[in-house]
Image (cartoon, helix red, strand yellow):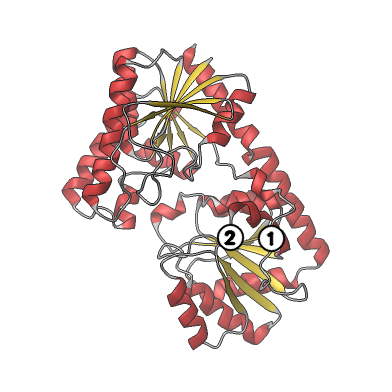
Amino acid sequence: MRVLLLTQWFDPEPTFKGLVFARELLRQGLEVKVVTGFPNYPGGKLYPGYKIRFIQREVIDGVQVTRLPLYPSHSQSALGRVLNYASFSASATVYGVLMAKRSDVIYAYHPPLTVGIAASLIRLFRKVPVVYDIQDMWPDTLRATGMISNVRLLNIVAKICQAVYHSVDHLVVLSPGFKRLLIERGVPERKIDVIYNWCDEASMSNPNGVVPKDFPCSDRFTIVFAGNMGKAQALDAVLDAAEIVQTKAPNICFVFIGGGVEVENLKSLANAKKLHNVRFLPAVPMSDIGSILEKADALLVHLRKDPLFDITIPSKTQAYMAVGKPLLMAVNGDVADLVKDADCGVIAEPENPESIADAALKLYSLSSLERNAMAERSKQYYQSHLSLSIGVKKFCEIFRKIMS
C-alpha cells in the first residue's frame, strides 16, 4: 500500500506525526512518501542548510520526503500566519494534482485547515481517498487561544471545516469528545475513529538523560509538571494549592520544568507567597525528560477550565503514562476519564486550589506499594491502548478499509 503523508510540518521541525510515524508505517509494511514544507517552525525562520526552492527531495531514515515552497512565518501576525498556511496549501495542491505519483491513500494532518483544503482538492482531481487526522478543533481552538476573535471570520472557518470534513473519506480524532462534537456538527459517526496520540517513546525510555542538579533530593515527595507554562496551563492555581500543602505536608515539593510566557510571573508569585515547596527548573532537551520524570513521585497535568479542554487529551498525559508514574490529573473531561479507566492517578478540579491540594495529599498518603501499583497500571495502559505500534496499526486498518 502506497501512502502519501501530507503535512505542513515535518522533521527536523518539532512535530507529532512526523518521522516517528512515517518510520512505523514503513515498519508495518507500507510504502510511505511525505509531502511537506521547508522547515521553519516554530521560529518562523528557515532551518540552517535549507533554502526555499521549487522542489527539494531528500531521504530521512529511509523515508522519502518532498519539500515544497512556502512563506516562512510563525509570528503573532495574523497576516504572516495566513501567508504561511496558504502558501503551503497552494504548493501542495499544485504538486498533488499535477506532479505527485499516484498513491493509494492520502493521510492529511490538521492543523492547519489549509492542509485539509489541499487534500480535498487533490482527492477531487486524482480520486485518491483521504484520511484526515484532526489534532486541533477549528474554529474552537482559534477562538479559545485568541488567534481569531472576529465572529464573522470564525464562522467562515467553521463552514470551510464542514466542507473539508464532508469531502474527505475518513476522519481520525484524538479523543471521544472530538468525535462527539463532530457528530453534533453533522459528520456521520461511521466516518470517525478515535486514535489516541502516543508519546516520544525513545525519549521516555532513555536511562541516560541528565537530571538537573537542582532537582529535589530523594527524601522529598516530588510532584512534577513538565512542559509549557502559559495562560492555558493556569498554574497560579497550583501555586495556591502548594501554599495549602506547605502547612500540612512540607515534605511535598512541586517542581515545574520548562519555559513559557508565564514563568516569570509564576516565580514572582511563588516568592510573594514564600513557598519553600516549589522549585522552577529550565527546559531540558527531550532526550533528557524521561530520566527526570522517572525521578518524580507523581506527575501533574493542569489546564484552565474551558469547554475545549474538556475534550482534549494533553500530550504530556501519554508521556507521563509511558514513564509509569501516578498522575495528578487536574483537567476535566476526556482525559480525566482516561486516568479513571487506567486507574493510574488521582483526579482534581482544575483551577481549584483546595481540590488540587487534596489530590496531592492523597497521593502522598498512599503507601509505596499502592503508588507502585498505580504506576504499573499507568505503564500497562499506555502499552495496550496508547503506544505508537497500537496507534499505527489502527491507522493501517483504516487505510485498508477505505481502499476496499
Question: Residue under circle 1?
Answer: 210
Tell me residue 73's x, y (percent). Answer: 31, 47
Q: Position of residue 206 (x, y in %)?
A: 71, 49
Toward the right, the furthest residue is 369
Q: In the figure, residue 276 lies in which quadrant?
A: bottom right
Classify mark 1: residues with Cα within 10 Å, few (<14), some (14-19) or many (20+).
some
Q: Is residue 186 visible in this depiction of the protein?
A: no
The answer to whether the residue labelled 1 contacts the one labelled 2, judged by CB atoms less than 8 Å apart, is yes
**Number of marks present in the image shown:** 2
- Residue 269's place in the image compared with 50, above or below, is below
Q: Position of residue 76 (x, y in %)?
A: 28, 56
Residue named by callout 2: 284
Left or right: residue 302 versus residue 219 is: left
Q: Which of the two residues, 45 or 74, is positioned nearer the viewer here?
A: 45
Q: Secondary structure at mark 2?
A: loop
Instruction: Please state if 205 lies on the left or on the right of 336 as rendered.
Output: right
Is 240 displayed left or right of 362 in the figure? left
User: Closest to the observer: 337 or 149?
Assistant: 149
Residue, x 45% and y 18% (percent of image)?
105
Q: Relative to residue 231, is residue 220 drawn left or right?
A: right
Q: Residue furthest left?
A: 152
- The 10 Å Cα crowd at callout 2, few under 14, some 14 to 19, many 20 or more, is some
Residue 113 visible in the current orientation: yes
Compared to residue 386, the image places residue 60 above or below, namely above
Position of residue 187 relative to residue 112, above or below, is: above
Three-letter amino acid code of the residue under disc 2 = Val
**Label disc, if present, on residue 388 of the rendered structure:** none
**What amino acid is labelled 1 in the image?**
Val
Question: Where's the N terminus, which quadrant?
Answer: top right
Please name whichever residue, 265 or 63, is drawn nearer the observer in this view of the structure. Answer: 63
Sequence-wise first label, 1 or 2: 1
